[in-house]
Every structure is written in C-alpha cells, then in structure tokens.
C-alpha cells in the first residue's frame, strides 16, 4: 500500500511521506541566523531612525528650528545590531553538545566556592566600619538594604515561583508605619520595627487573597497595580501621610537608650563611653543594624527551606497541579510566601525611614520594585549568595559609575545583556535540593527550569 493511500485526511502526499520516513526537515542554522539578524536590524532601524537620525537645530536667525537628517550614525548602529545578532546566533548554534555537562560542572564549582566566598563576604561586611571611610560605609549600608529586599523577594519569586512586581508596596508600608508611629506616638525604632513588619505582612496576606488563582503574567499585572495603588494612596492621603511633602524628623535608632547625637552628656553614646563625638559612629551603628537585619533574613530563609513549608514553596514553583494532587494546601502556601516576604520588606522599609530621617512617595516608585526583581533574577532564582553578589554588582557598580553619569545607563545595560547571554539563568543558576536521597549534588539550571529538580 502506498503512502498516499494511508495518508490521513487533510495531509498531502509530501507530508505523509515525511511522517512515514520520520525524517525531520534539514536544519539551516546559517539561514535562520541571517533571517533573525535581518529582523533585528529592521527593528533597530525603526527605533534609531527617529531617535538618532533626526536632530533639530535652531536656525541662524533664531526663527524656529531646523530638522537635520543624519543617515551615517543610523547606518552604523543598524550594522552593529545586525552583526552582533548574527554573531550571537552563530555562537549559540555552534555551542557543543556537552554544554549541559559544563553548566552542571560550573554550578557545582560555584557551590564549592560558595563555602569560601560567603564567609569571606561576611568577614568583609563585619569589619568594614573599622577600615573604611564614611562614603564606603554609606554605600555598604545601601547595598545591604537591597540585599535584604532581594532575599525577601527571593522567597516569593525564587522559592515559591510567584512573580511579584509590586514588592515596593511592602517596602513603603514598613517605612510609613515606622514614620507615623514614631512621630505621632513617640515610639522608638526597636518598638516600631516589629509593628512595621507585622503591618507589611498583613498587607502581603491581603494581596495574596485576590491573586490565589492567578499565575504568570496575570499575577505580575495585579501585583504591579497593587504597588501603584499603595503609592497613589500615600500620595493623596495628605491628612495621614502628608502627601507629596513627606514626613520629616523621623527619629534615629538608639543603643539601649543612648543617642548618637553631638554635644556629649550621659544620654549620648559618646558621652557614656567617654569618646569624642564623630558622625561616623552613627553611620557605623546604622550599618550594623541593617547588617543584622539582613543576616536575620538570610538565616530565616535558609531555615524555612528545610522545613515542610519551604519544600511546599519549591514544589509550588515546579508544578502547582502536582502540589494539589499531593494534598498540599496551595492557598496557605501562597499566602505564607507573600506574608513572610512582605514582612522582611517592611523591616527594610522601617530601616530606610530611620536612616534617612525623611520619606516621601518619590522613594517608592515602580523602579524600586524593578531593581529588586532585577537583583533576584540576575543573581539566580532561589540563590542567597547570587542575590548578594547581584546587589553588589548592581548597586555598587551604579555608584562607582557616577563619574560617567552620561554613559552610566548604557554601560549598565551592556553589562546586563552580557550576563544574560552568558548566564541566562543568573550568576548562580544551580541550586541544592532541600531533601536528597543519597549524595547531595547541585542541580543545574536546565533541570530546574524544566521542573525535574
């Protein structure tokens, strides 16, 4: 019987012959790479034509503007996009088949090196105020704030697999909770800190209830809207938050009642210990507070991964349907992830308020959520060490590029693109399973992405 006689309805002879022979179409990596590069160049031309190709100049007589066309810069940029995309596609297509084994070896090497890198980073963090000047201590404090935010968001995104674009809302709730309770009721930092965390966790639960059935892009849109709602409420509820003017004179934290103020006296840190007052004392004290809060966040996150709740988060990230089949309460699992992640965001917000002594709605825009999410993704989903390294690169690198302010965003974008091309799953893409049978081994990013880890 011929192939045409047994071909299903709607399938031509050529298609049936290909199915019978089980011979796939020949691969044409060169042609596909050229087509993709041409499409990229076409998109680049559409973007660069109005932005780079057209420039306005003032006329010599001062009467209006003159539109000038610059084809050469546009042609150069489009050619660079074409050649870069072509080289990238050819490099990706010619990668050896043993790339998986090399990625796994790289992940295991990172795990082994992490045993030395993490203690080294901790030692540097603990001793920084003893040898660094005030500028570097301030930069370290800022980096630790984002490390703490990254570890808090890592619970929601990295462990539970819930895409949250409105994490800045919990950051804002914690900051304004501390600011309002301290300025209106006279409470100190250590009294308001648990209150700020509890209120942020409560808002995390309130966010979790409406989005229990949402996943992926829909969940991201709702969380993004939640963050904007919180910002708009803070901006317009002037009787409570003082609106766009913000809240001033937020009290600083004390050390067992000792204030870090000038003038000496028995109620100050310098006067109690008989030291000469220096502004570095307060800066170092704030640094150690956020270092302690960040280490607490890390410790809690690592411990939670080893208990049934943390394993339920990882199972939810891999396959929600399988979680329901196994009897895991998905509702409780999602709500706890939102609540615990939001609590740590509230702690970070309270510290941000007391460090600056002033907060306003401009400090809690969407770009803050984007930066924290970028740190989590760049470091590697679920990786504590990766988040810390990504925060150092992102926040510290942005500060070091201040002299190149004109080109800072361009350099930063090129670095991110390079990292995403070379390490698409993040700097530390593998992970170690919480429960193993036999020898504990690092799981490469490919298996984690496919849900087989």
Image (cartoon, grey):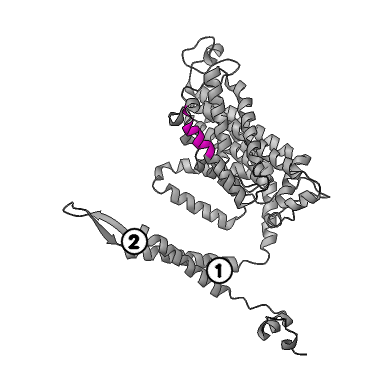
Mark 1 element type: helix
- Relative to 360, say whether 251 is above or below: above
- Relative to 16, say whether 364 is above or below: above
**Residue at the disc numbered 1:** 90
Residue 362, image x, y percentages: 46, 36
Q: Quadrant of residue 79?
A: bottom left
Q: CA distance from mark 2 to mark 1?
A: 30 Å
The region drawn magenta spans 229-238
Mark 2 element type: loop
Task: Bin the neighbour count of mark 1 within 10 Å (Cα to Cα): few under 14, some 14-19, many 20 and up.
Answer: some
Q: Is residue 334 left or right of residue 414?
A: right
Which residue sits at x=55%, y=21%? Answer: 182
> Which marked residue is nearer to the observer: mark 2 or mark 1?
2
Residue 53, disc: 2
Q: Nearer the viewer, residue 304 or 245?
A: 245
Residue 406, disc: none
Q: Is residue 270 left or right of residue 66?
A: right
């Amino acid at each position: 019987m011929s192939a045409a006689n047994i071909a299903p309805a709607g399938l031509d002879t050529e298609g049936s012959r290909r199915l019978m022979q089980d011979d796939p179409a020949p691969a044409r990596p060169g042609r596909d790479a050229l087509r993709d590069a041409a499409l990229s160049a076409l998109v680049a031309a559409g973007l660069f034509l109005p932005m780079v190709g057209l420039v306005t100049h003032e006329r010599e007589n001062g009467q209006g503007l003159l539109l000038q066309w610059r084809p050469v810069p546009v042609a150069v940029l489009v050619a660079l996009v074409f050649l870069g995309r072509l080289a990238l596609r050819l490099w990706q297509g010619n990668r050896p088949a043993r790339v998986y084994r090399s990625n796994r070896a790289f992940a295991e090497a990172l795990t082994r090196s992490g045993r030395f890198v993490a203690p080294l980073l901790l030692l540097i963090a603990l001793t920084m105020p003893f040898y660094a000047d005030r500028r570097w201590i301030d930069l370290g404090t800022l980096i630790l704030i984002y490390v703490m935010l990254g570890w808090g968001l890592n619970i929601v995104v990295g462990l539970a697999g819930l895409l949250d674009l409105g994490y800045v809302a919990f950051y804002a709730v914690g900051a304004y909770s501390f600011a309002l309770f301290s300025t209106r009721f006279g409470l100190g930092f250590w009294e308001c800190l648990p209150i700020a965390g509890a209120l942020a966790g409560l808002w995390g639960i309130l966010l979790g209830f409406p989005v229990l059935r949402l996943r992926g892009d829909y969940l991201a849109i709702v969380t993004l809207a939640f963050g904007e709602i919180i910002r708009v409420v803070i901006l317009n509820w002037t009787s409570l938050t003082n609106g766009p003017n913000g809240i001033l004179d937020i009290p600083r934290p004390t050390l067992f009642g000792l204030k870090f103020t000038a003038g000496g006296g028995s109620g100050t840190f310098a006067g109690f210990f008989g030291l000469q007052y220096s502004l570095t004392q307060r800066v170092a004290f704030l640094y150690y507070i956020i270092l302690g809060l960040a280490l607490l966040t890390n410790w809690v996150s690592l411990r939670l991964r080893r208990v049934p709740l943390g394993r339920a988060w990882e199972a939810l990230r891999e396959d929600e349907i399988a979680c329901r089949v196994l009897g895991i309460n998905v509702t409780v699992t999602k709500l706890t992830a939102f609540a615990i992640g939001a609590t740590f965001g509230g702690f970070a917000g309270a510290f941000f308020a007391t460090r600056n002594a002033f907060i306003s709605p401009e400090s809690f825009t969407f770009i803050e959520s984007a930066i924290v999410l970028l740190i989590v993704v760049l470091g590697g989903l679920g990786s504590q060490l990766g988040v810390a390294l990504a925060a150092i690169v992102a926040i510290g690198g942005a500060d070091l590029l201040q002299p190149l302010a004109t080109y800072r965003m361009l350099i930063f974008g090129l670095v991110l693109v390079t990292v995403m091309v070379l390490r698409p799953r993040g700097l530390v893409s593998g992970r170690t399973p919480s429960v193993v049978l036999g020898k504990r081994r690092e799981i490469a990013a490919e298996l984690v992405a496919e849900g087989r880890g």
